[in-house]
Amino acid sequence: MLIALKFIAAIALLAALHVSVMAALGRLLGIAVRQVSLGFGPALFSFGIFQLRALPFGGSVIFKDTRSEDTTDEAPVEHGHVHDAFDHKPRAVQVLLPLAGAASLALVALLLHPGSALASIGHGFVQIVAGGFSPLGTAQGLIEGARAFATQQGFVPLLGMVAAKLAALNLLPLPAMNGGQALLALLKRDSHEEDPSSLLQRLTEWGLWLCVALALSWLVAIGFFVVQGL
């Protein structure tokens, strides 16, 4: 139980850093922030644009975006009613802003484990995918390795290790991750008109299904590991 609490605390702290960096940088770049959520699931507490949710295993930042909201009732264009929207910022901003969240995690890993952080992030890509493909095999060994590390090390080294793995997770080229969001921004057309039949739209849909499949596979792996340990 203590090890599980250490992992939850590490993930919650890093998720808070992740979303805070993205929200702060977005505001610095002149983008309106609609919502900052820490965690997933039902909202437990709300204060302005900030929400604390039941499951502290991640977070999200929602920026103003004219592709997903109606801004016609706001001030005229000359007063900036779209100039503070994410999708009306230069392509470089749309690509780099999502990556800032993953970069903050990589920086924590580098500060806490300067000698092994890059290798840990690199291994993280392979481990996440391999574990997802083999939840009752490869994933079990990876979870056991993480448990042993948490048992032998203090909280700060654990925080560095988790930061490296979360950085790798968020850099995956999947739509729900920072890497995928940056890639979609890089590949999208200059026009703000959406084409539901476009190849990019289909790739986004397939990528979301891959995200769901990967998450479900790891949930099965973690559940199986817990049951086996009872």
Image (cartoon, rainbow, N blue to C red):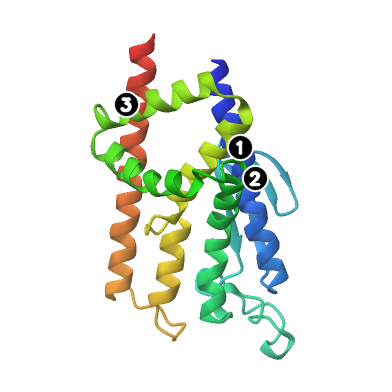
Q: Is residue 228 left or right of residue 54?
A: left
Identify whether 74 is placed above or below 136: below
Q: Which quarter of the image is occupied by the C terminus? A: top left
Are dots 2 and 1 in contact, CB under 8 Å? Answer: yes
Badge 2 amino acid? Ala
Q: Name the residue rendered at 32%, 21% in the picture.
A: 224
Viewer-side label of 3, 1: 3
**Horizontal and vertical percent for residue 100?**
58, 61
Badge 3 amino acid? Gly
Q: Does residue 54 appear anywhere in the picture?
A: no
Q: Name the residue rendered at 52%, 38% in the picture.
A: 162
Instruction: Say few, some or many: other residues with alpha carbon within 10 Å of mark 2 (under 14 / 14 to 19 / 20 or more).
Output: some
**Horizontal and vertical percent for residue 123?**
37, 44
Sequence-wise, the earlier of marks 3 and 1 is 1
Q: Is residue 228 left or right of residue 177?
A: left
Q: CA distance from mark 2 to mark 1?
A: 6 Å
Q: Which label was assigned to residue 16? A: 2
Q: CA distance from mark 3 to mark 1?
A: 24 Å
Viewer-side label of 3, 2: 3
Q: Is residue 110 left or right of residue 130?
A: right
User: Could you tell me which secondary element the residue under label 2 belongs to?
Assistant: helix
Badge 1 amino acid? Ala
Residue at mark 1: 12
